[in-house]
Each structure stands twice: as C-alpha cells, then as structure tokens.
Amino acid sequence: MTYLSHPVRRMRDEPEDESVALVLRLSEVDSEQIAEAVEALDGEIDAELEFESLRVVVPQKSVADLCELDGLEAIETAATLGIGSGDAEEDMELNDS
C-alpha cells in the first residue's frame, strides 16, 4: 500500500485546475516505468532524487491515477520534504493549545 500525505489525499479527492510538484518514493519499480506512466498522465519528471525518489509535476486531476500506480512506497508534495520552491507549511498543522 502506498503512503499518501494528507495534501496528496486532498488533491486526489478534490483536484483543482492546476499542476503540483510531488515526490514519488519508489519501492519495487523501475524509474523508467514510472516516468512513462507520469508522461501518460500529462506530467513530467522534474528531477531524480536520492533514496530512489523522483520529483514529478502533474496536473492535480491526474493525482488519483498516479496514486493507483504499482511500485510506489510513498507520494508526498515536494514542499513536504523541503524540495522545490515552496516550504512545508501546507503539510503542517499547528496545535493552538
């Protein structure tokens, strides 16, 4: 079963009309297979990262199909890991108590 961060689950269930940068952590799949699948979903590989991970940019409407791919250990927003132009704020929930 693929781990999905909270923002990824939200995009899967309620996609907006924009693209998103995601980090895919691979488990038992060749990165070329995932690259082909991402391209078929109108996305692109943005970077090959350490720890068998890829940063991809896909339309949010394709996130649900991306979540169904076999061989992924986790899907998180690039901002979760501090990768890319954003920061991790979207993945943080502050406790006001």
Image: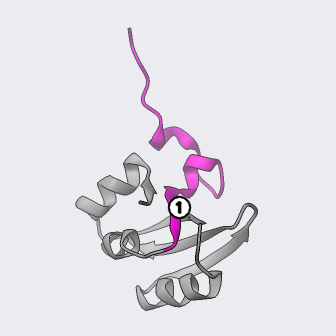
Q: Nearer the viewer, residue 46 or 9?
A: 9
Residue at the left extreme of this rendering: 14
Residue 3 magenta: no
Q: Can residue 23 be seen here?
A: yes
Residue tagged 1: 73
Of residues 60 and 51, the one drawn nearer to the viewer in this rendering: 51
Q: Name the one closer to the observer, 97 or 2.
A: 2
Residue 28, given in percent of the width and then of the height, sits at: 59, 73
Q: Residue at x 51, y 68 (%)?
A: 72
Q: Is the image coloured rainbow, by chain, by secondary structure, or in one colour?
A: one colour
The stretch of residues the image draws in magenta is: 71-97
Mark 1 nearby-residue class (10 Å; few <14, some 14–19, many ≥20): some
Q: Identify whether 12 is placed above or below 7.
A: below
**In the rendered image of this protein, does residue 42 appear above or below residue 94?**
below
**Residue at (60% x, 79% y) in the render:** 45
Q: Given the image, on which type of amino acid does mark 1 rest?
A: Glu
Element at badge 1? strand
The spot of residue 71 in percent (x, y) is 51, 73
Residue at 28% from the left image edge and 64% from the top image edge: 15
